[in-house]
Amino acid sequence: MRLFRQHVGIPLLLLFLMLLDGQISTLIASFLPIRFHLVCHLVLIFLLFISVEVSDVAAFTIFLVIGILYDAYYFHVIGIATLLLPLLSVLVNK
C-alpha cells in the first residue's frame, strides 16, 4: 500500500493540487484590484511536505515532472519551475 501511495497517489494528488492552485489564485485575483495579485502556493507547500516522505530519486523525479507540467500549463514555456523544483528537492533532502 505504501508503494502505491508513494508512486501513484502522491503524483496524482500533486497534479490535482496544481490545477486547484491555479483556480484558487484566479479566484483571489478576481476579488482584488488590478494592482494586487496574490498567489496560492499549495503545490509548493505540499511538495516540501512530501519530500521527506519519498526517496531522494523519487522526489527529484516527481519534482521534475511537476515542474515541467507547471511550466507548460501556466507559463506555456519550459523554464524556471522545471529548474527550481528539482533543485528545491535536492536542497530539502540534503
Image (tube, rainbow, N blue to C red):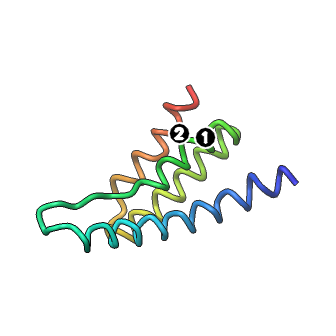
Looking at the image, the residue that sits furthest to the right is: 1
What element does badge 1 sit on? loop
Q: Where the N terminus falls, by quadrant?
A: bottom right
Residue at image point 41% right, 72% down: 23
How many residues crowd around disc 2 within 10 Å: few (fewer than 14), some, or many (20 or more)?
Answer: many
Instruction: Check if mark 2's residue and mark 1's residue have beta carbons within 8 Å.
Output: yes
For disc 1, the neighbor class at 10 Å (few under 14, some 14 to 19, many from 20) is many
Q: Residue at x 53, y 32 (%)?
A: 92
Q: Is residue 19 left or right of residue 81?
A: right
Name the residue nearer the viewer: 31 or 55: 31
Answer left or right for 19 relative to 24: right
Q: Position of residue 49 (x, y in %)?
A: 59, 42
Q: Secondary structure beneath disc 2?
A: helix
> What is the quadrant of residue 35 in the picture?
bottom left
Q: Earlier in the sequence, mark 2 or mark 1?
A: 1
Per the model, the C-alpha gap separating discs 2 and 1 is 6 Å
Residue kind at label 1, given as amino acid type = Ser
Q: Amino acid at mark 2?
A: Ser
Image location (x, y in percent) of residue 57: 65, 41
| Residue wearing tag 1 | 51
**The residue positioned farthest toward the top in the image shown:** 94
* Residue 89, label in figure: 2
In the image, residue 84 above or below residue 10? above
Q: Nearer the viewer, residue 53 or 73?
A: 53
Q: Is residue 79 above or below residue 84?
A: below
